[in-house]
Image (cartoon, grey):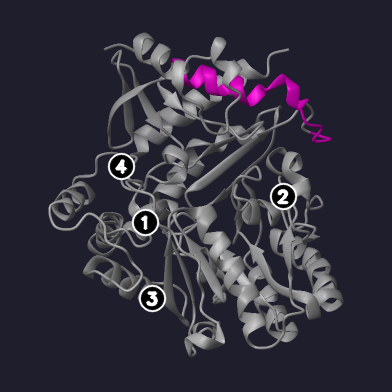
């Protein structure tokens, strides 16, 4: 079997996500045969360094033997059982472990299938909580501009990336959108912290005006990932937690992309020393092996649903594969790697190495900013560095970097004209240097007139 044969078969029957399929008339599809560590290999024997963790899910490398062994063992024991009225040990143990490592006070775990589903769960739980305690007038959500929380209709509604949202606007609930603390727009010489504090005043105004009808504020802590990897200071979370408490509004932390060590701490909220009312987890939860998500919340939220059946307060949201035992075993194996290896310390070392490898981009005439939070580093390409005038999106400069990188054996999938590194935690310093070198060449190729 070779790439061309599989590509032809693929294009005859498949419709791929987040893709204009007509692009594949000139942009080659790449069928992958296997993966090992940070490397993917296609059917023609070409290898690609996975610089984006296969859409941010792979933490400890492809075909990780620890996670793989756990899955193989579970498959021979119990593959699936209804999670309503029944339970199983992997699901129980995973919930026990998650409640111990997430920010304090999050004592109840609800499983779903993916990140968007987790956001839907949190939104519905928050709304339903207020209804159950007699505050049914709370029906709105506050979100940040440039935020992204998934593609299902509820998750899409509380996001604000127009590329994904605009088409479906007639189908979506109305939300209150507050300007982002995104520090790309800070004034020259202004620190991230000062800018973030200044921007929080706009959130405070929104809460003061709308709190009586608001269920929750939802944010991506520290990094707006699909929103061009824009970043902000942890002080925003501290101010937001205090404001939500004052105004009696829930705080939902969408840590689907930034959780499990990606920002330098196990969870991004830790850097602000705050606990949200809901935390949404997915992606790295299973180390990139299987779809699974979890929403953790407080006992006070849980108790608002706990009553005699006839009062109809139960949370009836469900998924057929809720708490799938195989996925739970993959997640348990992933957490065991965090316990057995000094992952966070290693990540801090790798983050420093990544910053060093990308140092030259700071002076590139077409790079407006190099920004980094932990194991996420992003470089924003612009037409004019001084004014930060962007390239017209129609020119697809970032895609040219992607194409060049593939020709050199690196998978760098851009976000528009933002090139970013978000690799598995098992990448080596020499592989980071290779990644940066290919990105440098790719940017040079992409910005030629």
| Closer to the eye: label 3 or 1 | 1
Q: Is residue 172 left or right of residue 108?
A: right
Q: Could you give the CA–CA distance between mark 3 and mark 2, rounded to whole angstroms?
A: 30 Å
| Closer to the eye: label 2 or 1 | 1
| Type of secondary structure dominating the magenta stretch | helix
The quarter of the picture where residue 154 lies is bottom right
Quadrant of the snapshot with the C terminus:
top right
Q: Position of residue 333 (x, y in %)?
A: 24, 58
Packing grade of label 2 (10 A; few <14, some 14-19, many >=20) is: many
Q: Earlier in the sequence, mark 3 or mark 2?
A: 3
The residue beneath circle 2 is 146
Please provide the residue range marked out in magenta.
Answer: 386-407
Q: Earlier in the sequence, mark 2 or mark 1?
A: 2
Q: Is residue 275 magenta?
A: no
Residue 9 visible to the viewer: yes
Secondary element at image label 4: loop
């Amino acid at each position: 079997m070779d790439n061309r044969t599989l590509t032809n078969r693929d294009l005859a029957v498949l419709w791929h996500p987040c893709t204009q399929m007509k692009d594949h008339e000139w942009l080659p599809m790449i069928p992958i045969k296997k993966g090992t560590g940070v490397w993917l290999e296609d059917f023609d024997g070409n290898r690609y360094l996975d610089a984006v963790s296969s859409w941010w899910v792979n933490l400890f490398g492809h075909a990780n033997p620890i996670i793989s062994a756990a899955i193989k063992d579970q498959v021979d024991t119990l593959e699936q059982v209804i999670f309503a009225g029944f339970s199983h040990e992997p699901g129980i143990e995973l919930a026990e472990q998650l409640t111990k490592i997430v920010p304090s006070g999050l004592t109840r775990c609800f499983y779903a299938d993916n990140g968007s589903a987790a956001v839907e769960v949190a939104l519905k739980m928050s709304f339903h909580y207020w209804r159950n305690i007699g505050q049914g007038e709370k029906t709105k959500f506050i979100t940040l501009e440039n935020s992204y929380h998934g593609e299902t209709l509820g998750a899409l509604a509380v996001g604000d990336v127009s590329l994904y949202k605009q088409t479906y606007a007639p189908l979506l609930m109305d939300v209150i959108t507050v300007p982002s603390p995104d520090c790309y727009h800070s004034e020259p010489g202004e620190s991230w912290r000062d800018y973030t504090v200044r921007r929080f005043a706009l959130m405070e105004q929104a809460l003061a005006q709308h709190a009586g009808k608001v269920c929750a504020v939802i944010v991506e802590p520290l990094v707006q990932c699909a929103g061009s990897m824009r970043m902000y200071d942890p002080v925003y979370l501290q101010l937001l937690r205090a404001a939500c408490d004052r105004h009696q509004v829930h705080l939902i932390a969408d840590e689907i992309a930034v959780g499990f060590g990606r920002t330098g701490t196990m969870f991004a909220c830790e850097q602000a020393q705050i606990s949200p009312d809901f935390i949404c987890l997915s992606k790295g939860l299973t180390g990139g092996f299987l779809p699974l998500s979890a929403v953790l919340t407080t006992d006070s939220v849980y108790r608002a649903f706990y009553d005699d059946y006839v009062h109809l307060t139960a949370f009836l949201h469900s998924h057929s594969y809720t708490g799938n035992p195989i996925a739970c075993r993959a997640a348990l194996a992933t957490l065991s790697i965090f316990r057995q290896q000094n992952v966070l310390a290693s990540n801090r070392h790798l983050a420093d190495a990544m910053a060093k490898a990308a140092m030259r981009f700071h002076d590139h005439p077409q790079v407006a900013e190099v920004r980094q939070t932990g194991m996420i580093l992003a470089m924003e390409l612009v037409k004019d560095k001084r004014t930060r005038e962007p390239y017209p999106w129609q020119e697809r400069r970032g895609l040219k970097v992607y194409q060049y990188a593939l020709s050199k054996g690196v998978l760098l999938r851009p976000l528009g004209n933002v090139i970013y590194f978000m690799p598995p935690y098992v990448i080596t310093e020499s592989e980071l240097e290779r990644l940066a070198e290919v990105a440098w060449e790719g940017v040079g190729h992409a910005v030629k007139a």
